[in-house]
Image (cartoon, grey):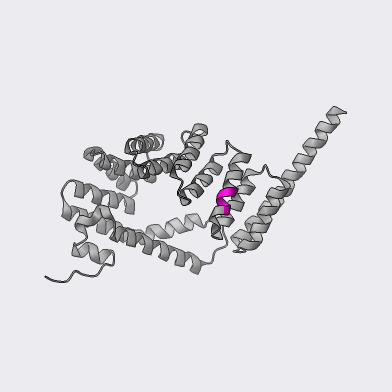
Amino acid sequence: MHRLFFVAVLCALAACQDSAAVYVARGNVLTNTGHLTEALEAYRGAVAVNPHAGGAWERLGDVLTDLGRRGEAKDAYAQAVAAEPRHVSLRQSYARALVAAGNIAGAREQLTAALDVAPTNLFARLSRGQLENQAGDRKAALADFEFAVHADGKSIPALYEFGLALLADGQLEPAERTFDRILELQPSSPSGWYGRARLKLAQGDRSGAATAAIESARRIAADAVQTIEVQEAGRAVRSEDLEAKAKALTARSIDRLAHDAGLALIQSDPGFRSAVGLPPLAAR
């Protein structure tokens, strides 16, 4: 009798999981075709039939985020983590929601828990390092970025963050080698040229910094296209929408470069101003 009861429970659980998967699959299709309200109801159906489906809670949080309902999204991600506490990507999603809510300490805790499970996860490692920088804990950030580079010496994001952290720590020669490595691996990398511009300024070479910053600006548009294509891979997105998103990302990136406090010393350079769309300075 007990054995039969146990088998029945297992069958019920399997049925719940299968039902949740059907709802999630429907929600994914609706999301990919832009029907977010209907997708929301599908994901709600998934967590209703199986409250222990962390992935369904995560997708619910994602669509709530897309709908601008960030508070509800944060709660959904919290439920996802509670359902599957050792699932690294769920903690990363929750951490992003906590950052959006201004809870940097809570986000760091989530990423630390993720790294306890998967120490070599680069996304979690770099994300925690960035939050450590925001919190003013530069030594901890440097350690995380160094760990990431040792884990994957060809990761452009890891090398970039490590190079900037070395610069902030006053280690100019290792920073120079790091930015050189980025451009060796990917000559078209805007971040590699940006890092070189920051390095040149630290070395007192404003002309060299302006030249590197201009090279960074020239490469932003092509990089934005690649970024959007990766982000939207597998989704039913029209080519004109992809183009619009790439243009918007390019504009945001150029604007950040134009007003970057780290490049303040070259913002009067005519070539730099032209490259980032700033008007010429009035003649004195």
Q: Residue at x 49, y 55 (%)?
A: 231
Q: In the rendered picture of this protein, how many numbered marks are placed on residues?
A: 0
Q: Residue at x 44, y 41 (%)?
A: 105
Give residue 55's position: percent from left, percent from top: 62, 46
Work out which quarter of the rendered image holds the C terminus and state it.
bottom left
Q: Residue at x 58, y 37 (%)?
A: 85
Tell me where residue 151 sits by quadrant.
top left
Q: Nearer the viewer, residue 213 or 234?
A: 213
The relative height of residue 203 versus residue 148 in the rendered view (above or below) is below
Tell me where residue 260 sits by quadrant.
bottom left
Q: Residue at x 38, y 34 (%)?
A: 147
Q: Nearer the viewer, residue 250 or 152?
A: 250
Q: Magenta segment, which residues?
A: 72-76
The relative height of residue 271 versus residue 162 in the rendered view (above or below) is below
The relative height of residue 151 versus residue 47 in the rendered view (above or below) is above
Residue 74 left/right relative to 138? right
Q: Main secondary structure of the magenta part?
A: helix
Tell me where residue 86 sits by quadrant.
top right
